[in-house]
Amino acid sequence: MLRITRLTDYGFILLAEIFQGKGKLSNSKDLAEQLDIPLPTVSKVLKLLLQGSLLVSIQGSQGGYRLAREASAISAAEIIEVLEGPVSMTACCITNGCDRNCAVSNSWQKVNSVIVDKLRSVSLEEMVIDGAT
């Protein structure tokens, strides 16, 4: 079974919460309390999202985090790639491929491409709106 990690799941949850704040700055302490996620985990994920240019940080006592751009311009694939690295179903789907030249390698690359394309076509905004219905 293919699964994203818990940190990536938290990343989606945090980004959705920040998006739903409609531009209001969100701080890690409040996010941790609102979402019942441990503060160290929230801090770690927010740092990764900041480094991946999905969030911006405003310093100061009234500071916090906000989306770096519109939620409609942030794809599910981009979120996964920031938190986990390139989406890759198998070793033969990574950039340099695997060391085997087997009969199914090209097929896995095609399947991986379809999945990545679909993830790129779904925005954070769509995920939040679809999740609310």
Image (spheres, rainbow, N blue to C red):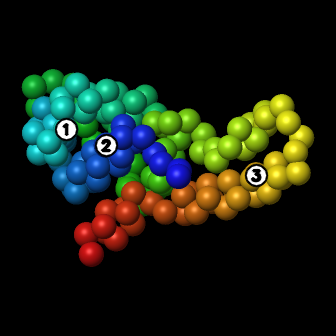
Q: Tell me, yes or no, if residue 128 can be seen here.
A: yes
Q: Is the residue marked by circle 3 packed among few (<14), some (14-19), or many (20+) residues within 10 Å? A: some
State the image quarter where residue 117 is shown: bottom right
For label 2, the crowd category at 10 Å Cα-Cα, with few meaning under 14, some 14 to 19 and many 20 or more, is some
Residue 63 visible to the viewer: no
Q: Earlier in the sequence, mark 2 or mark 1?
A: 2
Work out which quarter of the rendered image holds the C terminus and state it: bottom left
Q: Secondary structure at mark 1?
A: loop
Estimate the x, y position of residue 33 in percent, counting from the top left.
Answer: 10, 39
Query: Residue 86 location in percent, x, y?
Result: 60, 40
Give the residue displayed 62% in from the left and 55% down from the top: 116
Q: Amino acid at mark 1?
A: Ile
| Nearer-N-terminus badge (1/3) | 1
Q: Which residue is mark 1?
A: 37
- Disc 2 marks which amino acid? Tyr
- Asked if the residue under mark 3 is in contact with the one under mark 1, i.e. CB atoms within 8 Å, the reply is no
User: For the residues marked 2 and 1, what is the alpha-carbon distance in whole angstroms?
Assistant: 8 Å
Sequence-first tag of 3 and 2? 2
- Pointer 3 residue: 109
Identify which residue is drawn at 42% across, 40% down: 5
What residue do we see at 36% from left, 37% from top?
Answer: 7
Relative to 9, is 123 on the left or the right?
A: right
Q: In the image, is residue 133 above or below residue 118?
A: below
Q: Name the mark on residue 17.
A: none
Residue 21: % across, % down:
19, 53
**Disc 2 to disc 1: CB gap under 8 Å:** yes
Residue indicated by mark 2: 10
Packing grade of label 1 (10 A; few <14, some 14-19, many >=20) is: some
Residue type beneath disc 3: Gln
